[in-house]
Image (tube, coloured by chain):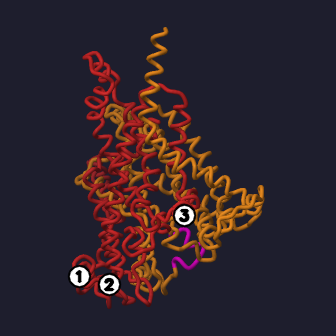
């Protein structure tokens, strides 16, 4: 009796804690959504908490309005720009990174450890540390306001990350797999393309999703290297929603929510890869 | 013997071929710029013509003798220390919770990734709106429940503002820390759990004997990773407070940003960047040791 009662109280506490955790996790997002559908009057009323009426006007104007305002035009271009930049950065980094990290994980050559350490160091440097030479190069070469500039710059940090994580991943693939292939008379190239590459697909998925999110999240370089309406990325465009009176929080929250959809969907689809992707490189370095 | 040496050489040749494209990118976009920053840090740079004049260590002595620099460093370390500490302590509690059996556990674990996936800048703007003094939901709710009498200017007070940044950062990163620690907890075997239950150990003893050893390797990973990430902090500060009020949230990256883009002081800016890079280098050496120990 006493035991089962104690148990019941324990379960109650457990569920209370779960509710608290879920609330803390989702409430800010919910508030972002409410702010995007609340009317302008209620958004700026000083005491109203929940909306009495909803409006989807902001979504309508951001996505479908035929005569978009300047900020909306920038936002739409930015949605496309961020997708292209994040997609291209991920693709380039994955291809170059997969090939390089296999060599780091499996082959013996001089200067391997210092090079691998260098790769990690450059990935950990804060973006601000490299901004001066980038700025000088980009402005001298007249590459401001170009998507390719951001792809190239993002590739540096993302590629380093890919190598670091996939290095750990390749090390975790058993040697026997390759040896079996060699015994069967496969050449190095055949072993690499037919055995190693397919086995490592989960690794590519994990690191690919994280790379995409990293590039999607990038802010400082976009802020500095883009200024034209057509070339801004989402992180910059979202921060700039304002009226002549100040920040337009309703639009900012709507745009922010739209900018969040892709990363959240990716994170939820690939959830089981993400934690392993984040810990892999660091544990098995 | 001779043959083996030949094989080794062929292997190295293959390896160099495989790493060359990636290494060229990293050399061009990482190594060369770092060398350029080192060189610039010993020069006075004309921001218009980019003409340089060698000034020795004077950029460094100027930075290191400047109270503003030490203030920024102090703010950064405070932000880093408090954020990481809070996130590790709360992260441990959350991970223990997520390790329990309860209905909807899969759902709760999945939604933990949502805050982490919100782009940093969007997260910062969201909290800026929540903290808004006149119309923000935080003040509205606190006034509604009579917890406060008048609106608090959350980002207008130096002592408060840095903690508001920590809160925003924690909302985004805590779930991820919890999930990483959970991955550690999941290595605990069922037998170990049951043995501890039979022993009649209390909750704290059970935690120390069974779960803590499983958490330890994850703690080191999270600690080093989050320390480096928080020392790099820029975006969230830029969007939430822009370093204010009165420079009370001017973290080191933001200090460098102002020096470079507001005062166009490339030489001094470079010196600050090198100092940040050295701090990161020291931390990554620790990181590397930790990585080796984890093998």
Of pointers 3 and 2, the one earlier in the residue sequence: 2
Where is residue B200, by image quadrant?
Answer: top left
Q: Nearer the viewer, residue B70 or B268?
A: B268
Q: Are marks 2 and 1 in contact (CB under 8 Å)?
A: yes
Q: Are marks 1 and 3 in contact (CB under 8 Å)?
A: no
Q: State left or right for residue B185 relative to residue A54.
A: right
Same chain? Circles 3 and 2 = yes
Q: Chain of mark 2?
A: A
The residue that appears at 25% across and 53% down in the rendered structure is A269
Residue tagged 3 = A140
x and y, in percent, of residue A208 in the image: 33, 48
Same chain? Circles 1 and 3 = yes
Residue A210 visible to the viewer: yes
Q: Nearer the viewer, residue B51 or B85?
A: B51
Taken as a whole, is the magenta stretch helix, strand or loop? Answer: helix
The residue that appears at 62% across and 53% down in the rendered structure is B36
Same chain? Circles 2 and 1 = yes
Residue tagged 2 = A69
x and y, in percent, of residue B252 in the image: 61, 62
Residue tagged 1 = A65
């Amino acid at each position: 009796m006493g035991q089962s009662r104690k148990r019941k109280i324990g379960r109650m506490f457990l569920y209370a804690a779960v509710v608290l955790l879920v609330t803390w996790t989702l409430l800010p997002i919910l508030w972002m959504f409410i702010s995007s559908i609340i009317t302008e009057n209620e958004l700026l009323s000083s005491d109203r908490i929940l909306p009495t009426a909803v409006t989807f006007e902001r979504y309508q104007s951001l996505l479908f309005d035929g005569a978009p305002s300047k900020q909306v035009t920038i936002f739409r271009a930015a949605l496309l720009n961020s997708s292209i930049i994040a997609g291209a950065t991920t693709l380039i980094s994955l291809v170059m990174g997969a090939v390089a990290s296999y060599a780091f994980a499996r082959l013996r050559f001089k200067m391997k450890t210092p090079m691998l350490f260098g790769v990690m160091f450059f990935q950990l440097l804060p973006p601000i540390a490299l901004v001066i030479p980038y700025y000088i190069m980009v402005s001298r070469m007249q590459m401001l306001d170009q998507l390719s500039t951001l792809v190239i710059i993002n590739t540096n940090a993302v590629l380093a990350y890919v190598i670091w994580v996939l290095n750990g991943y390749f090390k975790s693939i058993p040697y026997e797999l390759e040896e079996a292939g060699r015994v069967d008379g496969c050449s190095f190239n055949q072993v690499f393309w037919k055995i190693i590459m397919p086995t490592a697909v989960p690794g590519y998925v994990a690191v690919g999703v994280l790379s995409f999110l990293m590039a999607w999240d990038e802010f400082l370089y976009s802020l500095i290297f883009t200024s034209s309406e057509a070339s801004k990325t989402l992180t910059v465009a979202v921060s700039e929603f304002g009226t002549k009176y100040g920040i337009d929080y309703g639009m900012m929250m709507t745009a922010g929510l739209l900018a969040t959809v892709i990363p959240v969907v990716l994170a939820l689809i690939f959830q089981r890869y993400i934690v392993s992707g984040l810990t892999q490189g660091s544990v098995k370095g | 013997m001779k043959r083996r040496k030949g094989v080794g050489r062929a292997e190295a040749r293959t390896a160099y071929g495989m790493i060359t494209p990636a290494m060229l990118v990293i050399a061009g976009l990482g190594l060369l710029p770092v060398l350029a920053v080192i060189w610039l840090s010993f020069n006075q740079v004309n921001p218009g013509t980019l003409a340089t004049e060698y000034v020795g260590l004077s950029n460094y002595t100027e930075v290191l003798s400047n109270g503003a620099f030490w203030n920024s460093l102090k703010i950064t370390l405070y932000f880093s220390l408090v954020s990481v500490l809070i996130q590790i302590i709360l992260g441990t509690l959350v991970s223990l919770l997520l390790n329990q059996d309860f209905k909807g556990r899969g759902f709760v674990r999945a939604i933990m990734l949502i805050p982490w996936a919100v782009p940093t800048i969007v997260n910062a703007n969201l909290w800026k709106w929540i903290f808004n003094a006149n119309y923000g939901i935080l003040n509205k709710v606190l006034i509604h429940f009579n917890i406060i009498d008048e609106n608090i200017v959350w980002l207008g007070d130096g002592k408060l503002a840095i903690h508001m940044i920590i809160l925003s950062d924690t909302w985004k990163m805590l779930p991820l820390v919890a999930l990483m620690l959970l991955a550690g907890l999941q290595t605990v075997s069922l037998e170990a759990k049951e043995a501890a239950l039979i022993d009649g150990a209390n909750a704290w003893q059970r935690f120390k004997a069974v779960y803590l050893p499983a958490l330890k390797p994850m703690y080191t990973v999270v600690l080093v990773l989050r320390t480096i990430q928080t020392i790099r902090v820029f975006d969230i500060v830029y969007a939430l407070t822009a370093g204010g009020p009165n420079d009370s949230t001017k973290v080191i990256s933001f200090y460098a940003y102002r020096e470079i883009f507001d005062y166009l002081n490339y030489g001094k800016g470079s010196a600050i960047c090198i100092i940040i890079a050295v701090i990161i280098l020291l931390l990554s050496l620790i990181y590397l040791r930790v990585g080796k120990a984890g093998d």
